Amino acid sequence: MDVFHLLWLVPAFPLAGFLILALFGLRLHSRAVAWIGTGSIGLSAILTLWIGIHFLTQPPANYQYSLTLWTWFDINGFAPGIALYLDPLSLVYIFVITFVSFFIHLYSTAFMRGDEGYVRFFAYMNLFVFSMLVLVLANNLLLLYLGWEGVGLCSFLLIGFWYRDEVNGYAARKAFIVTRIGDTAFIIGLFLLVKQFHTLNIQDILQQAPVVGSAGAAAVVWITILLLGGAVGKSAQLPLQTWLPDAMAGPTPVSALIHAATMVTAGVYLIARTHVLYSLAPAVQSLVAIIGLLTLLIAGFSALAQHDLKRILAYSTISQIGYMFLALGVGAWTAAIFHFMIHAFFKALLFLAAGAVIMAMEEEHDIFKMGGLRKKMPITFWTFLAGSGALAAIPLITAGFYSKDQILFDALASTQGSFWLWLGGFVGAFITVLYTFRMVYVTFYGEQKKPITHNPEGEKVMMIPLIVLAVLSIIGGWIELPHAWAHFTPFSDFLTHVLPPTNLKPGMESQELMLQLLTAVIVFAGIYLTWLAYVKKPALSASWKNTALGRACHDFFYKGWMFDQLYNTLFVKPVVWISRIDPHDFIDYIYEGFGRLNVSIHAGFSRTQSGYVRWYLLCIAIGILFIFSLILFV
Amino acid sequence: MITVPVSVQLLLPSVLFLIGLLGVLIRRNVIFMLMAMEIMLNAAGLVFIIGSSLWKQADGQVMVIFILAMAAAEVAVGLALILQVYQMHKTVDVDQLRELKDEQEQG
């Protein structure tokens, strides 16, 4: 039985969930809302699992499956269709999206309980999952752009979810506007693609690309740069990374779903999908790697100075996506996707556990006001530790080790890699361990500075997702063992049907073991150092912070390397100044004049409706007189 | 019989009509406005009779009887309405009955 033709149901279930909740949600009981909101994603997840099993056991021809639903429009031969395309890359993505979304929705049924916007929340979340699925399943770039815009919209709606507080509105607008800059680059890239290839069908473009644009051809370079601009905006990389830390104003499940696991990885997906174009423009591919490298370092240092729990995780997300960009840039395509999958697991876990902590601490976000939660919130602590371990890439026992080490090795060993890229990633990994375990120690160890008001440990629907994601953060890496250990790599074997394998410089495989030992050393060193600094002798870090240099560094990193201030001075202030130097234009007078003319004519006519009966009668009499004179004398 | 030219004959009804019209326009008491309207109606009836005598047909005179009957009914209804107006507004000054005025503010 061909289950693939049910592929359209995978995005259709969340869309149906959104429509039902948007139209009738306010009339439903909150339990029904929870069931519909979570159930639609659950159905998609089960269907994805079924499709996935079929795909693995009885793969379709060439590991590709296309399902055209209908033609969107047809202008002069340019006819993109509403068509879905399933191959190993999109299968991995829909698996991650549906499963992680399902657990986050399950968690939200308890987390958002009592909120007056309960229905609105699940409606927007369902719309988001629909848009994201359309994005990854689209077979042409126009439909992908539809999903791209959809996730941008839902991100705006969900960041500004608690809209009555204007700060959340600012954060939502900032996110939307910054990603819009990237979207503009994206659409210009699409125009160039249409001009060059006369189609936006992804597979057609990838097949025609080597012919139309030999390596270095200007068109391909521009297209890849513009698409990279779009990816950089959506994935919060340099220079458009400023929106993600402020996006933490939204509810924690939103941060977990949108700003950790799914939307921010759309850029990674885009570059992986159009990998042929990037292979034809090696300069741009190197740019991808450099952007990834710089971003991971900048975000890593910034995370070290934050004290808002969610902002640490936000900068961490920016940093980890920098790793994925680094991998894409050196041609380690499967490693980037592997890290995406593992990152989705542990970052969603970390956000959800952070949500539990914030809920227990009565909306307190500052980690220095928490402490000592280890004994009181055991499940949260152990799952948070599992996620942190994966983030820090503790060797062997966490999945993060396998994915991150793969990237670090490929950064050095790939034909497009270099020592400096590896070194940057290596330093970044050390910083990652530092900020991660700083977060763990300050939040969960030490003295408890604030009492727990409402302990969510009893909520099964909140704890089960944490446990499941924690298990995945541990065992997820075992499907892709490093080549130095064994030849057990089912994940990349599966993806190599779509993405090219990584070309390694000759003789590099022998270095892999040594590199892994190096990373293991810095991981344990980092854990020990942070334990010393934050648990054993907290006075040490405090004394360094009191020096002038320490304060300056802390301030600089705390403000995210002052990018917000930079953009404020470069862009925001001049535009505001220009718009304020001429508030009363002469052109305004013309338009205002129209309005005022209208109003005065109305006022004139209005005076004839005086309400005096005798005035009306007089007017009638005058009118009759007028008509009589016309009849008699004309 | 003294033959009066039609133009002279029509003089009386037109003067009566004008008196009625001016009465409606000038008078402030609603009851007097009604009375003036009656004068106008009667003037119209006079014109009908003049026409009937001019063309030697009875239709005009039948019409006048119509008008008289209709005027009576109209006055009945009008007086009932005036009674209601008085009960609501405690006045029969038509200048006080201004609720349909357009309350447009200058803006």
Image: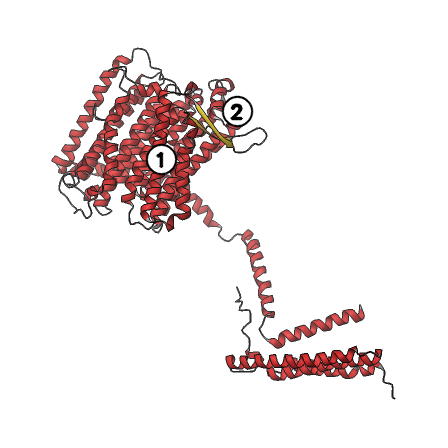
On-image quarter of the C terminus of chain A? bottom right
Residue A333 coordinates in the image, percent (x, y): 36, 22
The quarter holding residue A365 reads top left
Side of A414 where A276 appears, left or right: right
Residue A141 coordinates in the image, percent (x, y): 47, 30
Residue A425 coordinates in the image, percent (x, y): 28, 25
Amino acid carrying label 1: it is: Leu
Between residue A199 and residue A475, name the one nearer to us.
Answer: A475
The circle drawn on residue A43 is 1
Secondary structure of the residue carrying tag 2 is helix
The answer to whether one can see residue B92 in this image is yes
Residue under numbered circle 2: A197
The answer to whether one can see residue A569 in this image is no
Side of B21 where A304 appears, left or right: left
Between residue A524 and residue B42, name the one nearer to us.
Answer: B42
Question: Which comes before the other along the chain, label 2 or label 1?
Answer: 1
Secondary structure of the residue carrying tag 1 is helix
